[in-house]
Image (tube, rainbow, N blue to C red):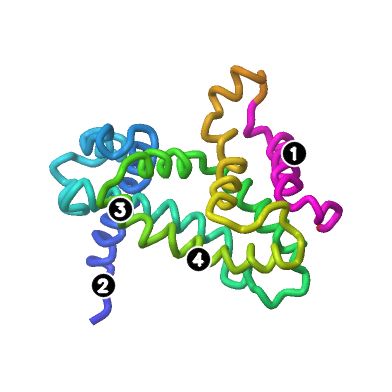
Amino acid sequence: MPPTASTRAPQQRSLATRQRLVAAACAAFARRGFDGASTREIAQRAGVALAALPYHFKTKDALWRAAADDLFARLRARFPPGDDDLATTDLAGRLRRLLGEFVRFCAEHPEHHHFMMRAGSAPSARLTWLVDAHIRPMFAAVDPLLERAAAAGLLRTQPTPHLLYMIIGAAAVPYAAAPEFRLVTGKDPGDPRLVAAHVDAVVDLFLPSTRGVS
């Protein structure tokens, strides 16, 4: 039986509450890590009574995993299926666009890098789940594209796990360390002109032979 208007309203409110909790959890876990963030803080930020939190998420761990799922869903949404199509003849242009879009994502979502740095700083069952659920599949999707780029002579270095982490660091750190960046340089890394310049710099650093390709 399809839901009626009287049942849809509570369902919609419940979904909206869950979304607020996940958004608050993303911010709290990115800023303080799993151990430092409290469910009380998250509930307050979301405008939800602490006593109501178990209705939506039975445990703090379940809330953390929902936050991780949400962060990676945002990342995947920036790269629709087909963006890593290995059959493309415009490999240089596609690589530049993909890398540029990743830099822009990092500029818009510094909390993603904060979350990952805190999650990855010590072994845990949560980290193992995060790697299996999100990180390893992401690397597995990217690696064939880098292999092809290396074979075509487009990459400065061979595609290794180190290269992937170098790309992540170069793309994300100015935005993850934005307060430090502002104090050191007197500039806002989120300024659209600086973001555009950073996109060009990162792309040219890792794909120097593709300069001039759009």
Q: Is residue 107 visible?
A: no
Mark in front: 3 vs 2:
3
Badge 1: how crowded within 10 Å, few (<14), some, or many (20+)? few
Residue 203: in magenta span: yes
The Cα–Cα distance between marks 4 and 1, rounded to whole angstroms, is: 29 Å
Which residue is disc 3 drawn over?
Answer: 65
Which of the two discs, 1 and 3, labels the residue nearer the N terminus?
3
Residue drawn at point x = 81 percent, y = 54 percent = 209
The Cα–Cα distance between marks 3 and 2, rounded to whole angstroms, is: 31 Å
With 38 as the anchor, is 100 left or right in this view? Answer: right
**In which quadrant of the rendered image does the C terminus lie?**
bottom right
Answer with the quarter of the image where residue 78 lies. bottom right
Residue drawn at point x = 75 percent, y = 59 percent = 154
Considering depth in this image, is 154 or 102 the residue closer to the camera? 154
Q: Using the image, tell me which numbered label, if any, was put on residue 140.
A: 4
- Percent position (x, y) of residue 135? 43, 57
Which residue is disc 2 drawn over?
Answer: 4
In the displayed structure, would residue 11 be above or below residue 109?
A: below
Q: Secondary structure at mark 4?
A: helix
Q: Is residue 67 visible?
A: yes
- The amino acid marked with disc number 2 is Thr
In the displayed structure, would residue 193 be above or below residue 129?
A: above
Which residue is disc 1 drawn over?
Answer: 197
Residue drawn at point x = 24 percent, y = 53 percent = 62
Q: Which residues are magenta?
A: 188-213
- The amino acid marked with disc number 4 is Ala
Badge 2: how crowded within 10 Å, few (<14), some, or many (20+)? few
The Cα–Cα distance between marks 1 and 3, rounded to whole angstroms, is: 34 Å
Which of the two discs, 2 and 1, labels the residue nearer the N terminus?
2
